[in-house]
Amino acid sequence: MVHTISFLMCLMLLCMIIVAFMAVLLEFVLRDTTDYDMEFLWNHKYTLEDLHLDGRKEGK
């Protein structure tokens, strides 16, 4: 019985560590925005062709 409780406590600890890691990862993902990227692009005046965002194929 003692081994079962010890195993379950270790399993709960592992699950808590995994959940905490996922929560931190989710926080980083949710806080990441493209505002800085757009400001960088605006300040450096890249064209759509420079960024390959013009939608045209390279061969045309």
Image (cartoon, grey):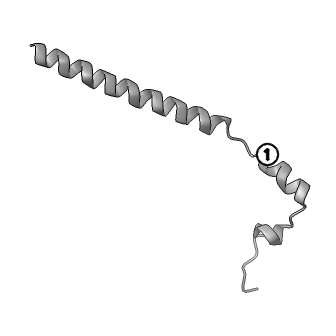
Dot 1 alpha-carbon crowd within 10 angstroms: few under 14, some 14 to 19, many 20 or more: few
Q: Is residue 32 left or right of residue 56?
A: left
* Residue drawn at 51 percent across, 29 percent down: 23
The residue furthest left is: 1
* Residue drawn at 25 percent across, 23 percent down: 10
Quadrant of the rendering where the N terminus is positioned:
top left
Q: Is residue 12 left or right of residue 49?
A: left
Q: Amino acid at mark 1?
A: Tyr
**Circle 1 SS class:** helix
Q: Is residue 39 left or right of residue 22?
A: right
Q: Is residue 52 left or right of residue 22?
A: right
> Label 1 belongs to which residue?
36
Quadrant of the rendering where the C terminus is positioned:
bottom right
Q: Give the image location of residue 11, x and y in percent.
A: 26, 25
Label tally:
1
Q: Nearer the viewer, residue 58 or 17?
A: 17
Q: Is residue 12 above or below residue 55?
A: above
Q: Is residue 8 above or below residue 40?
A: above
* Residue drawn at 86 percent across, 64 percent down: 46
* Residue drawn at 43 percent across, 28 percent down: 19
Q: Give the image location of residue 26, x and y in percent.
A: 55, 34
| Quarter location, residue 15 | top left
Q: Give the image location of residue 27, x and y in percent.
A: 59, 32
The residue furthest bottom is: 59
Q: Is residue 26 above or below residue 13?
A: below
Q: Nearer the viewer, residue 58 or 34?
A: 34
Q: Nearer the viewer, residue 17 or 35?
A: 17
Q: Give the image location of residue 38, x and y in percent.
A: 82, 50
Q: Nearer the viewer, residue 36 or 55?
A: 36
